[in-house]
Amino acid sequence: MTAFKKSIFIDAPLEKVYQYTINPENWSHFYNGLSEAESISGKGEVGTIVKTKYSMLGMHFPVTIEVTACEMTPEGAKWSGEMTGNFPSKQTSTYVPKDNGTELTFEIDSFGTPDSLFGKIIDKLVTDKMEENSAMHTLENIKAICEHSDVKNA
């Protein structure tokens, strides 16, 4: 299992960042390697289920994401989801108001890449680093969209 944490400051109100990122219709716009959803059941609240594909090394793998936590609190907000399929993992996103903006943190617990697919091709250390880089790229995408977009829910 691999666990890591990545954070970024976004110069946009917490509610804007939170509402944009919990909407499963938006996930493929910012989440590195995630394809447009094949099916969505829910609007991002607890129990929402999204069937999609995740791309790595030019290959596309079917995954299912289920939202397990989604709440705003006086201190900020929290969202968690579990991904099943070839890349089982859990992601928790925390949103904290900071300096008139939002500090967004991803905590990701990855339960492993498919050894049968990558074990002979690429070292686990490489895939772990790729996952960390992908998470940081995703945070940078959210920052760019939320800081420079006037669209609803962004």
Image (spheres, grey):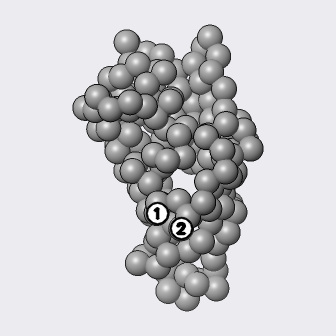
User: Residue 82: x, y in percent?
Assistant: 69, 52
Query: Could you classify mark 1 by the number of other residues whose Cα lies within 10 Å: few (under 14), some (14-19), or many (20 or more)?
Result: some
Residue at figure coordinates x 69%, y 63% from the top left: 84
In this rendering, the answer to whether 45 lies above or below 100 is below
In this rendering, the answer to whether 149 lies above or below 110 is above
Look at mark 2 in the image and give the residue it sits on: 53
In this rendering, the answer to whether 95 lies above or below 86 is above
Q: Secondary structure at mark 2?
A: strand
Query: Could you classify mark 2 by the number of other residues whose Cα lies within 10 Å: few (under 14), some (14-19), or many (20 or more)?
Result: many
Q: Horizontally, is 53 left or right of 116 in the view?
A: left
Mark 1 in CB contact with mark 2 (< 8 angstroms): yes
Q: Secondary structure at mark 1?
A: loop
Q: Horizontally, is 82 left or right of 75 in the view?
A: right
Front-lying residue, 2 or 55: 55
Look at mark 1 in the image and give the residue it sits on: 35
Q: Of marks 1 and 2, which one's residue comes earlier in the chain?
A: 1
* Amino acid found under the numbered disc labelled 1: Ser
Q: CA distance from mark 1 to mark 2?
A: 5 Å
User: Residue 117: x, y in percent?
Assistant: 58, 84
* Amino acid found under the numbered disc labelled 2: Lys
Quarter of the image where the N terminus is located: bottom right
Front-lying residue, 92 or 41: 41
> Does residue 14 appear in the picture of this structure?
yes
Q: Which mark is residue 97?
A: none
Q: How many marks?
A: 2
Residue at figure coordinates x 63%, y 76% from the top left: 114
User: Residue 49: x, y in percent?
Assistant: 68, 52
Residue at figure coordinates x 40%, y 48% from the top left: 30
Q: Horizontally, is 28 left or right of 119 in the view?
A: left
